[in-house]
């Protein structure tokens, strides 16, 4: 496993595949950011059947970086309060195109900050 390859991929690509739990058959593409060599994402839709809520039920899942699939453990970061400003800034910097800007501004609102999840990489599939 090469965690650095995954981090580099996430830093340089806007959409990253994610599969929460073991019941979902396909990857969903979402925004992810890297802060302090850790991987974070926030739920946009806040739906009951979201990837976020699926990870709350079963913390195991996968992320897809190009053709490489990494097994991940999803956790609520204990130090979220200390990281929030930095995560917000990375979202605003990474997703700064004209099309993405309004969503980047939205995803740093409190209701989305509360749905921040960290992904800890395990084995490669």
Image (tube, grey):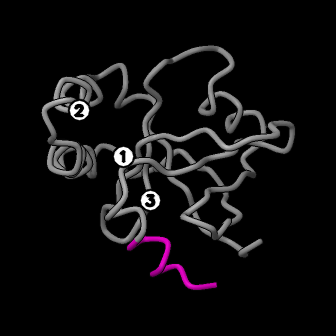
User: In terms of secondary structure, where does tag 3 sit?
Assistant: strand
Indicate the quadrant containing the C terminus: top left, top right, bottom left or bottom right.
bottom right
Res 38 quadrant in image: bottom left
Residue 92 to residue 104: above or below: below
Judged left or right of residue 49, residue 109 is left
Q: Residue at x 53, y 44 (%)?
A: 76
Q: Which residue is mark 2?
A: 100
Residue 102 to residue 69: above or below: above
Percent coordinates x, y for residue 95 in the rendering: 23, 43
Q: Which residue is mark 1?
A: 80
Ranked by sequence position, the earlier of labels 1 and 2 is 1
Density class for disc 1 (Cα within 10 Å; few <14, some 14-19, many ≥20) is some
Q: State the mark number for residue 39.
A: 3
Between tags 1 and 3, which lies in front?
3
Judged left or right of residue 51, residue 116 is left
Whether the magenta-drawn stretch holds residue 5 is answered as yes
């Amino acid at each position: 496993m090469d965690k650095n390859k995954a981090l580099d991929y996430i830093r340089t690509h806007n959409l990253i595949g994610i599969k929460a739990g073991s019941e979902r058959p396909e990857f969903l593409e979402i925004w992810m950011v890297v802060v302090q060599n850790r991987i974070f994402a926030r739920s946009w839709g806040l739906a009951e059947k979201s990837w976020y809520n699926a990870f709350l039920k079963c913390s195991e899942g996968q992320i897809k970086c190009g053709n490489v699939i990494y097994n991940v453990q999803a956790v609520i970061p204990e130090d979220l309060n200390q990281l929030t400003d930095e995560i917000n800034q990375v979202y605003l910097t990474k997703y700064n195109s004209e099309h993405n800007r309004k969503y980047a501004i939205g995803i740093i609102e409190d209701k989305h900050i509360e749905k921040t999840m960290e992904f800890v990489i395990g084995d490669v599939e």
